[in-house]
Amino acid sequence: MAKPDPLTYSTETFIAGLHDTKPPVTFDPLAWEALAKERLSADSFGYVWGSAGTRQTDDNNRAAFKKWGIVPSRLVKANFTNLKTTLFGDEYEYPLALAPVGVQRIFHQEGESAAAKAAGEEGVTFILSTATSTSLENVAKANRDGPRWYQLYWPSNEHHDITASLLKRAKENGYKVLVVTLDTYMLGWRPSDLDNGYNPFLRNDNIGVEIGFSDPVFRKRFKEKHGAEVEEDVGKAAQEWAHTIFPGTSHGWEDISFLKEHWDGPIVLKGIQTVADAKRAIEVGVHGIVVSNHGGRQQDGGVGSLEVLPEIVDAVGQKIEVLFDSGVRCGADIAKALALGAKMVLVGRPYVYGLAISGQEGVRHVIRSLLGDLQLILHLSGVPDISSRKLNREVLRRIL
């Protein structure tokens, strides 16, 4: 079913204003964080807002966008910008995806189900985190026929059977692309979580560990080891699952072969920051990469992700699909990442803030706001189609 033009959201809002009805949530993307903070506990807000160390990487992510300005072309006769993009041979309605964010039920009781449903209804790709607080089967039901991908926090090789089980379940439930996060084999040094003494994966519930609690291979292993079902010792099971998906040491490039044996769709490596690693990704035969530093959450003192995007695109963009993540807050940010060569842009914190503010409708508001903003920016810049050569570095000027 064709999705409405993103700009219809602004039209609907102005028409409602004629009847003295104002939107329940602000359209200012920089205000969503403060609204979410008002609604969340210190633990929950600290988790989503928190970054590694002094937040230098997070700051650098945001600063990198300010170094580029958009230069419009005039007298371009065209309809509103076509936002369709093609990845791995499939056409996607929009170049926007909801990034994999775990433990979403600490932000709203409906958690991942609400976010996945909103994404599905709006035709935006939803990427489910292994750290979900809702089973991948239930998320698939909420997402219905929406485009959905699965993000893997990769267990160590001694747990190959668990990894294979997760991939099998994802494939059986319609997740088309496998996104493998490379930079989080253990959680980063995050002062906000440390100050609150809060690690959601170690608590006596299923938040962040539900995908393990619902996995038949993990459940069998746990019972054989402890002589009890997961539900009989939730605290121990949670800690054991957390150690399984955050083993503390990284895989090697040679281990990609196992994923290729157990996943027959596109494989994308998330967390690439160097040309050398991007070239290595091509050598091992994966289909895409996400230029990302995990939104500044894993390593302090890092370079802004947008800073390295152009050189990576120049080196490998003709041989592998390049996606982008980290620091995105508005339509202009998405436009800049696309102009610098990304085929799709992932957004994280903004939609989580929307979830905290107003559940499914909050996520929907964020999605529609970002897409409307993006389409209008590109239309006013004289870009008729994001897939054309009209959206490239000639649209931008380095200003800092």
Image (tube, rainbow, N blue to C red):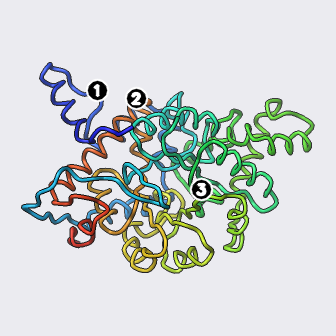
Label 2 SS = helix
Spot occupied by residue 237 in the image (x, y as percentages of width and height): 78, 40
Mark 2 or mark 1: whose residue is earlier in sequence: 1
Specify the farthest residue to the top.
19
Which residue is found at the position 61% from the left and 33% from the top? 138
Name which quarter of the figure residue 325 lies in: bottom left
Considering only vertical position in the picture, is 378 above or below 144? below
Residue 41 seen in the current view? no
Q: Label 2 belongs to which residue?
A: 358
Real-space Cα separation, disc 3 to disc 1, in angstroms: 36 Å
Q: Label 3 belongs to which residue?
A: 178
Mark 3 or mark 2: whose residue is earlier in sequence: 3
Q: Nearer the viewer, mark 3 or mark 1?
A: 3
Spot occupied by residue 372 in the image (x, y as percentages of width and height): 26, 44
Q: Label 1 belongs to which residue?
A: 24
Name which quarter of the figure residue 178 lies in: bottom right
Real-space Cα separation, disc 3 to disc 2, in angstroms: 29 Å
Spot occupied by residue 66 in the image (x, y as percentages of width and height): 26, 63
Amino acid type shown at disc 3: Leu
Name which quarter of the figure residue 269 lies in: bottom right
Crowding at label 3, few (<14), some or many (≥20) Cα neighbours within 10 Å? many
Label 3 SS = strand
Of 214 and 7, nearer the camera is 7
Amino acid type shown at disc 1: Pro
Considering only vertical position in the picture, is 309 above or below 378? below
Which residue is found at the position 26% from the left and 72% from the top? 393
Amino acid type shown at disc 2: Ser
Crowding at label 1, few (<14), some or many (≥20) Cα neighbours within 10 Å? few
**Mark 3 and 1 residues: CB-CB less than 8 Å, in contact?**
no
Crowding at label 2, few (<14), some or many (≥20) Cα neighbours within 10 Å? some
Real-space Cα separation, disc 2 to disc 1, in angstroms: 9 Å
Of 107 and 351, nearer the camera is 351
